[in-house]
Amino acid sequence: MSEQTWNAQGYQTNAGFVPVLGRPVLELLAPRPGEHILDLGCGDGALTVELVAAGATVVGIDASQEMIASAREKGLNAHVADAAHLSLDGAFDAVFSNAELHWVKDADGAIASAWRALRPGGRFVGEFGGHGNVAAIVTALFAVLARRGVDAAPFHPWFYPTLQAYRARLEAAGFRVDSIALVPRPTPLPTGMAGWLATFANPFMAALPEADRKAALAEVVDLLRPALCDDRGDWTADYVRLRFAATRPA
Ligand code: BEZ
């Protein structure tokens, strides 16, 4: 039921911090020259270029045509594909993923894709929204839809597992989990809550008639102001990251 379209320019303006704040997971991956790396959910390629700069040979995949077009403009080897149904067999030394896996409701499908793509001994390193991620924002979206008689649950597009639940999924697929942690990361929003919602709230707004959406979004902003806006008018989102490194045993 989820409906998310991407505008690469809008994403850059409202959410350009997503790749910038992906540095810790890049460091956890520690790409080496000559490695073959799959970037699962490469978006517009802002972090993929860093993998290339580290000397790796990189293939990026993303579900969004707009994002892949933007990644290709950067000269990247990037393709539209569904992270939950990849059949890239055993060619990669590492699978890297930043800010993607919370969009893939078929979590086991994505983990199986990473497993198939890796050679034995290869590593799967990623970061995405974990349990409690943007909890206040999600609660406000549910409340505003409920005021209009709509149950938001079927429109909720994100998968935010606990680390115990995600560890169990990785292990059930055969991975050895080398590290896994939930990391609270309050995140300043450069264009405020309205900008964030304009980029990310489409799946919820799809539940409402077009004519109601503007007022609904304004209500979400009002509900969140006491919790997420400071006395200078600056907004901070309540992000929580789930960061992990796992290995396909040799
Ligand atoms: C995230 O990166 O955690 C995120 C991105 C879009 C919507 C919600 C959360």
Image (cartoon, rainbow, N blue to C red):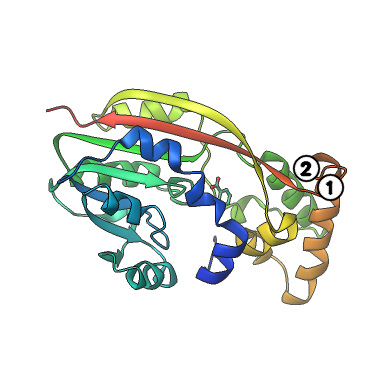
Quadrant in the picture for the N terminus: bottom right
Tell me which residue sits at (33%, 56%) in the image. 49
Please rate how many residues cluster around mark 1, counting C-alpha atoms within 10 Å: few if below 14, some from 14 to 19, many from 20.
some
Q: Is residue 11 above or below residue 92?
A: below
Q: Nearer the viewer, residue 155 or 80?
A: 80
Give the quarter of the image for residue 217. Answer: bottom right
Location of residue 35 in the rendering, given as x and y in whole percent from the top left corner: 17, 44
Q: Residue at x 35, y 73 (%)?
A: 73
Give the position of the C terminus as an image quadrant. Answer: top left
Q: What's under tag 2, amino acid-wise?
A: Leu
Q: Which residue, as the protein is rendered here, is positioned at the far bottom?
A: 211
Q: Residue at x 80, y 47 (%)?
A: 224
Label number found at residue 225 = 1
How crowded pointer 2 is (Cα within 10 Å; few <14, some 14-19, many 20+) is rated as many
Q: Position of residue 50 (x, y in %)?
A: 34, 51
Residue 7 in view (yes/no): no
| Disc 2, SS | helix
Whether residue 5 sits left or right of residue 146 in the image: it is left
Circle 2 residue: 228
